[in-house]
Image: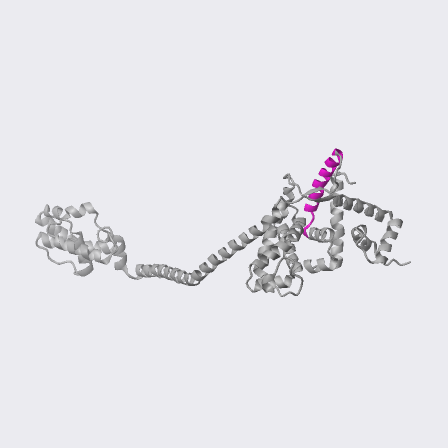
Amino acid sequence: MKKDYKTEELLENLPDYINNNIENNKLKEAIEKEILINPEFNKEFELIRVTLKSINRLEFSSPPDNYFNSLLPRVNERIYENSENLNILKRFASYWKYAIPIVTIILFFIGYKVIFKNNDYINRINNDSEFVLKEYNYSDYIYTDTSINFKEKTATEYSENKDSNLDNTYDLKKTYNNKKEPVKSRITNNEELINAFLDLSDNFAEEEIFFPDDDDMYYEQDLENFSNEEQNSLISTIKNSNL
Amino acid sequence: MIDNINIQSEDKDIIESFKCGNKNAFNLIVLKYQKRIYWLVRKFVLFHDDADDITQEVFLKLYKSISDFRGDSALYTYIYKIAVNYSLNHLKKNKTLSAHKIDIDTEVFKLKSNEPNSDEIYDNDINAKMIQKAIQILPEQQRAVFTLRFYEELPYEEIASILGKSVGGLKANYFHAFKKIRNYLLEKKTVIK
């Protein structure tokens, strides 16, 4: 005779059968029959019955006394806290609506400036040798501050104190920027000789060579110690060198 | 009519009153359903502290969403679904945590029998702990079916609509849940009477 239910199907209904939760009589009969004729099925039935009985003997422990009396106030407290948090969030949301675009624009602007400032700097280094010289050779003497006003002020102070200032470095700079005269062909006194040296130093500067501080201070005095012959010889050597 | 509601009033009247701005109507809903929801959640998560927290969450969620409740189903079914979802989420989140929680001496179960002798108390205490652990190590789906069918005695069709599973699959889950509990108890040589 063909069985109406597979053994697996009957097994799945065993817990409900034990708990008397099966209304389908045909299914109930099929389970009872299987218990009688199938020892393996009977064993499963017994084990599940005992397990169910064990669980049924236990019940959950009670919550603390007055728990249910205090639940409503705590629920209301959470609702209040939640609504407060929502209000704060709403307030922040209204600020962020404006703050986010503004911050984005500022960051974009800063990024733009940084990128293009670097590009500009690189371009100037590549294309503007004068800029390079200024940056690398004169920085210690002139650019103690990047402010243009400061540079102009420094220049004025230097001009005013030129007579008393033995350091002619600023003149040297001025010469570099404003005067592009060739070295004079004939030099008859110390002043002309110094000017020739200044022009010469310009040429050195273009080759990124510069006098150290200590030498700057004394080169004028050194020249004065030369005899006329030595000076003329030196000048002609310089002229012949085509520097 | 709506202003004269009390805990005995129909759910639809209480909800209508709440929607009209009577905040006290929500308190009536909490008072009316707090025990049923607490015990439902407790059977899922076993521990009182977790059940307390989830019960509050359920009512908080209800407070936020009750304005959208259209009355297609009974209010209890609506709250019930929220509670089951929150409990299942809790089980998912605390899968590893809850397995260790058994080591803490927390009383989850107690004996139903009134005056057992001392041997019985001892045996049942061991049984209670082992059964508690056996339930805790059940896979999430089997635990959900076990709770809803065994403790809540819900019909499979209703469980299927809550969990979004087929009835056939749920029956298999229910049987395997018992089998796992039984195997665990046998493995631990727990006294099964």
Residue A239 visible in the current orientation: no
Whether the magenta-drawn stretch holds residue B13 is answered as no
Could you say which is closer to the camera, residue A232 or residue B170? B170
User: Which residue is pictured at 20% across the width and 59% down the height?
Assistant: A177
Could you say which is closer to the camera, residue A108 or residue A48? A48
Percent x, y of residue A33: 88, 52
Please state if A47 lies on the left or on the right of A99 as rendered. Answer: right
Could you say which is closer to the camera, residue A10 or residue B156? B156
Please state if A28 lies on the left or on the right of B42 as rendered. Answer: right
Q: Which residues are magenta?
A: B118-140
Percent x, y of residue B86: 62, 54
Residue A134 visible in the current orientation: yes
User: Which residue is pictured at 17% across the width and 48% down the height?
Assistant: A216
User: Which residue is pictured at 77% across the width and 40% down the height?
Assistant: B192
Please state if B109 lies on the left or on the right of A147 as rendered. Answer: right
Please state if B9 lies on the left or on the right of A55 as rendered. Answer: left
Percent x, y of residue A10: 82, 54
Q: Where's the N terminus of chain A, which quadrant?
A: bottom right
Residue at the far right: name it. Answer: A1
The relative height of residue A218 versus residue B78 in the rendered view (above or below) is: above
Whether the magenta-drawn stretch holds residue B124 is answered as yes
Majority SS type along the magenta span: helix
Percent x, y of residue B129: 69, 40
User: Which residue is pictured at 14% across the width and 51% down the height?
Assistant: A234
